[in-house]
Amino acid sequence: GPGRARRLLLSKLFQPLNLQAGGEAGWEDRPGEPTCRSQRLMLQAGLVHPSSPGCYCYLPPTVRAMEKLIRVMDEEMQAVGGQKLNLPSLSSAELWRASGRWDRMGPELFRLADRHDKEYCLAPTHEEAVTELVASQSNLSYRQLPLRLYQVTRKFRDEPKPRFGLLRSREFYMKDMYSFDVSEEAARQTYSLVCDAYCSFFSRLGLPFVKVQAATGSIGGTMSHEFQLPADVGEDRLLLCPNGHFAANVETINGEQTSCPTCREKLTQTKGIEVGHTFYLGTKYSSVSNAVFFSPENKLQLAEMGCYGLGVSRILAASIEVLSTEDSIRWPSLIAPYQLCFIPPKKGSKEEEEGAVLMERLYDDLTEVLPHLSGDSVLDDRTQLTIGKRLKDANRLGYPYVIVAGKRVREDPPVFEVWDQNAGGVLFLTKEGVIELLSKVREIG
């Protein structure tokens, strides 16, 4: 029918593979070459293409993964009353001067002037813009609060040394939420609600995160937490209690603290990749823009604010960094660009004709029962290559499931090989068995 996604042929997919480059020693030492596992794997798999320092072209499979990731974020944000909007990337210097951040941000801010010599920055974050927006609502009532507004947009930061691919780039995607509450108590409730939503989000992705006490930095405010993925390539140093009572970024702790305040165990140090950050802001920004609401007594009061960020493109790369092996990508299964890869027999093999027909039939029956898988499948039609070579590529690209029509499709009933990449095993199943197995794969969204 119209609008039904067909399975994609790998030969047609715009994903310039460079898998032969695998494991070449010395890559890391050349200037401009990959400096960490996720960057190397993403370049080899044709997921990103470097454009200029710290800027990347995202190829179609990466965009699919990112859209799935954003869908999971949307579910979590909407579950806590988030409303999605979109604020401009160009932000006027006046707004940033009023908050004091035009000067404080220094050279990290991309600055530009228009033809009328009006100054702007390419926004790395949107506290000023969203507070100005809420302040422009002149008769906001306490009944309309809390407001929890969020967006997923491109952000810009003039990194002095972009590195690690999407982990530290100059142009990146972020989900940022801003909350407006009637009182400090209500704002702190919102804060813990959003922190819980972040925990739920990372748990659904199966990522081994830790929530740590953090410094407030250039955003400001009085309370802050980071969500970190422990990894050797991480740029933050964390101190963790082995029993889970305490976790903090080293920058928040005075040098003397070496044991857990709760159980006195010695704190262990690890490195982390920051993938989320939350701030309780109070009236730091609402007082500048005069973002006020009418209280039940009809008095004007400043809104109490919080802001919350998830690095979308950074989470993509960080999840590959922490889940993958040296030469094979592993995705959180919720966001793998394609759930299934079909590998038909090699051209000229005994099972070529039979295997191709059986695979076609399996695909049709599978997508009738599980329509969401029809647009989530790739057929590796490079039949001039052996099954072994294509299986190796599929393993390195990290499809959660790979279905092979090998020698056993000539049995009665025909038997397919099904590789469950995340569990790391192979099953031999009839067509019905394959459908039963895949009906357990959770539909996204």
Image (tube, rainbow, N blue to C red):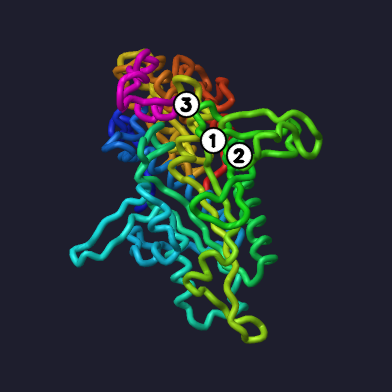
Amino acid type for the residue under numbered disc 1: Asp
State how far apart marks 1 and 2 are (Cα).
7 Å
State how far apart marks 1 and 3 are (Cα).
40 Å
Q: Assess whether mark 2 and mark 3 are in contact (beta carbons under 8 angstroms).
A: no
Please provide percent x and percent y for residue 51: 27, 37
Specify whether residue 354 is in view: yes
Q: Assess whether mark 2 and mark 1 are in contact (beta carbons under 8 angstroms).
A: yes
Q: Quadrant of residue 255?
A: top right
Image mark for residue 382: none
Question: Is 244 situated above or below 325?
Answer: below
Question: Is 239 situated above or below 190?
Answer: above
Please provide percent x and percent y for residue 390: 38, 20
Please provide percent x and percent y for residue 29: 35, 18
Horizontal side of 162 relative to 214 (left or right) equals left
User: For the residue labelled by badge 2, is the local secondary structure a helix, a strand or a loop?
Assistant: strand
User: For the residue labelled by badge 3, is the local secondary structure a helix, a strand or a loop?
Assistant: strand
State how far apart marks 3 and 2 are (Cα).
44 Å
Horizontal side of 278 relative to 88 (left or right) equals right
Amino acid type for the residue under numbered disc 3: Ile
Residue denoted by label 3? 403
N-term-proximal mark, 1 vs 3: 1
Highlighted range, magenta: 17-44
Residue denoted by label 2? 249
Local packing at callout 1 (Cα closer than 10 Å; few below 14, some 14-19, many 20+) is some
- Residue at 29% across, 34% down: 50
Residue denoted by label 1? 236
- Residue at 58% across, 74% down: 302
Q: Nearer the viewer, residue 167 or 415?
A: 167
Q: Quadrant of residue 265?
A: top right
